[in-house]
Image (cartoon, rainbow, N blue to C red):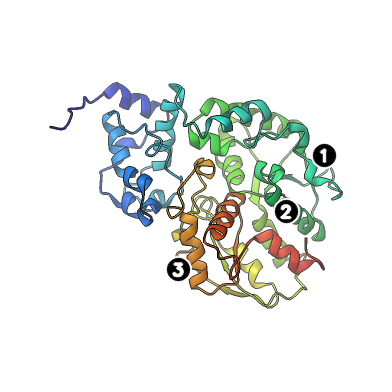
Amino acid sequence: MDEIKEVSLDMRDYIVSSGAETLSWCMQCGLCTNLCPWRQVTGEISEAFNIRKMQRLGQLGLEGFEGENILFACVTCGMCLVNCPRKVEIIDNVKSMRNTTVAAGFLPATLRPIAGSLHANGNPWAGPQEKRAEWQEGLNIPAFTEDTEYLLYVCCTSNYDTRSKKIAKSVVKLLQKAGVSFGVLTAEENCCGETIRKIGDEALFTKLAESNIKLFNGKGVKKIITTSPHCLFAFKKDYPELGGEYEVMHYAELLGDLLKEGKLTFSEELAKKVTFHDPCYLGRHNEVYDPQRELLQAVPGVELVELGRTKNKSLCCGGGGGRVWAEVPFGERFGELRINDAVDKKADILVTACPYCIAMLDDACAGLEKGDVLQVMELSELLCSASLPGGL
């Protein structure tokens, strides 16, 4: 006989008070579960994670949602969110359920070093603060002042990860080529905090965000360019709650405007078939779909082909919601499906515009041994190679 579980209205109310105001709206239709990317793969996590069931456990205040392969499996991709007929804020509900768990002292072992590094170093990659701006050497990037139009905020990943530093450098070169007035405060910044908030550590997010807001406001920052869609989300949608009001855009949006104004051109031919993977946090979460495609189509020789699952139906890379640090067995990774999608389209290059996506897709491409037929590139890298002799 199945164990009888006791409904806890106190637990339900605690979850709701932590930010899950729409939890009761869920009518258990199951559309979210059917659309979830975990339904696209098989394995232990796929069998354990059911977003509909997790919402129901929260509604009833029942135990059972706290497991690492349940509560912390959600990639916060937003596929369920944008398709929910009741407009339930499912990701806010997940975040709130995580809040209650993290506040009680439980954090998966894989995420404890991440939180520890954020506390100690202001970034999740265990990188010393004094090395945050090392990648800028030789690029002649000015410090931000009140006379500068844009602050360029570079994602922690691109400040410390060797592969990802190429993204930061290529964005800088493109902005310089287009004559954009921008500067940096990299050495003084902390992580934007988007991912740790999704993981459920609200206090740590607030600490990081308040530090950045104090810095930005003190320096007179009004406009911010981000290299990561996750930073874009944080600055646009999280920071206003704490007094951080800025005009924020992903670098692809600004480059798209510069292209239309004739301030950015591409002279180097690239005779390749190219396809684009829409990052969840650039696409579904921020509804930026056109600039990146317009930029790719402006490169001489490029043939742009669309993936089968694209734009607001794009398949998640698997890196959101803290999952970029998760250990997922080979054969169960969303990125592998994405690589196969690109190979099926006979694309030469799979382009994306997010440091997390690059990490996940690079790993998947190497794991599938598809590097001989498909190259994974970040949008700024491809554009840089097409606009400057010698590229990067």
Within 10 Å of disc 2 (Cα), the crowding (few <14, some 14-19, many 20+) is some
Say which of 23 and 352 sits in front. Answer: 352
- Residue 365 is situated, as x and y percent measured from the top left of the image, at 55, 60
Question: Which mark sits nearer the N-terminus, 2 or 3?
Answer: 2
Instruction: Report whether 237 appears left or right of 380.
Output: left
Circles 2, 1 touching at the beta carbon (< 8 Å): no
Q: Is 44 on the left-hand or right-hand side of 296?
A: left
Name the disc covering residue 166, or none: 2
The nearer-to-camera label among 2 and 1 is 2
Q: Tell me residue 167's x, y (percent).
A: 70, 53
Give the quarter of the image for residue 279. Answer: bottom right
Give residue 107's position: percent from left, percent from top: 47, 29
Res. 60 image quadrant: top left
Residue type, label 2: Lys
Q: Which of marks 2 and 1 is nearer the N terminus?
A: 1
- Tell me how far mark 2 sits from mark 1, CA to CA: 25 Å
Mark 2 secondary-structure assignment: helix
Residue type at mark 3 is Gly
Q: Nearer the viewer, mark 2 or mark 3?
A: 2
Q: First in sequence: mark 3 or mark 1?
A: 1
Q: Where is residue 290 in the image (x, y as percent from the top left)?
A: 58, 64
Q: Is residue 267 visible?
A: yes
Q: For mark 3, does the 10 Å Cα neighbourhood hold few (<14), some (14 to 19), or many (20 or more) residues? A: some
Residue matched to label 1:
145
In this figure, which residue is indicated by the disc labeled 3? Answer: 308
Label 1, secondary structure: give it.
loop
Amino acid type assigned to the residue bearing label 1 in the image: Thr
Name the residue at 69% across, 56% down: 254
Q: In which quarter of the image is the N terminus?
A: top left
